[in-house]
Image (cartoon, rainbow, N blue to C red):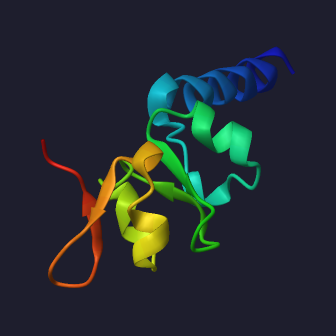
Amino acid sequence: MKPILSAVLLASLATVFSFPAHAEKVRCSAIRDSAMCVAEPSCWYDAANNKGCLDGPRPEENACAVHGSESTCNTSSLGCTWSAAGECVTKTE
């Protein structure tokens, strides 16, 4: 009886210790909570497009591009200006 228990214990330990401790990589798409998503350094939360938690670094965006009208874009507190191409861009001084 003891050899069988020893074999089962040894097999269990071998299974547990054969997997590296860092094998549990965070799957950002599995995170449903925005706060938990932002807390993970390898994830970012896309609330604007309603896509949820995504892998990788947050893409660089022009914050002024969301302003669709010239009157909103030219508000001095935003740091944006209306371009000749008809779009709102970041003011360069």
- Judge by depth and name the residue closer to the eye, 15 or 26: 26
50 sits left or right of 3 in the view: left
Q: For this view, does 29 lie left or right of residue 66?
A: right
Q: Is residue 24 left or right of residue 57?
A: right
Which residue is painted at 64% across and 72% down in the image?
50
Q: Quadrant of the N terminus?
A: top right
Q: Is residue 20 visible?
A: no
- The image shows a total of numbered marks equal to 0
Q: Position of residue 86 (x, y in %)?
A: 25, 84
Q: Residue 41: horizontal and vertical position, in percent? A: 47, 32
Q: Is residue 20 above or below residue 77?
A: above
Residue 40: name its quadrant.
top right
Q: Nearer the viewer, residue 43 or 85?
A: 85
Q: Is residue 44 visible?
A: yes
Quarter containing the C terminus: top left
> Is 68 positioned to the left or the right of 88 in the image?
right
Q: Who's the residue at 26% across and 63% down the image?
A: 89
Q: Residue furthest right?
A: 1
Q: Is residue 17 above or below residue 53?
A: above
Q: Residue at x 37, y 50 (%)?
A: 56
**Location of residue 59 (image quadrant):** bottom left
Residue 72: % across, % down: 49, 67
Q: Position of residue 92 (x, y in %)?
A: 14, 47
Residue most extreme to the bottom:
86
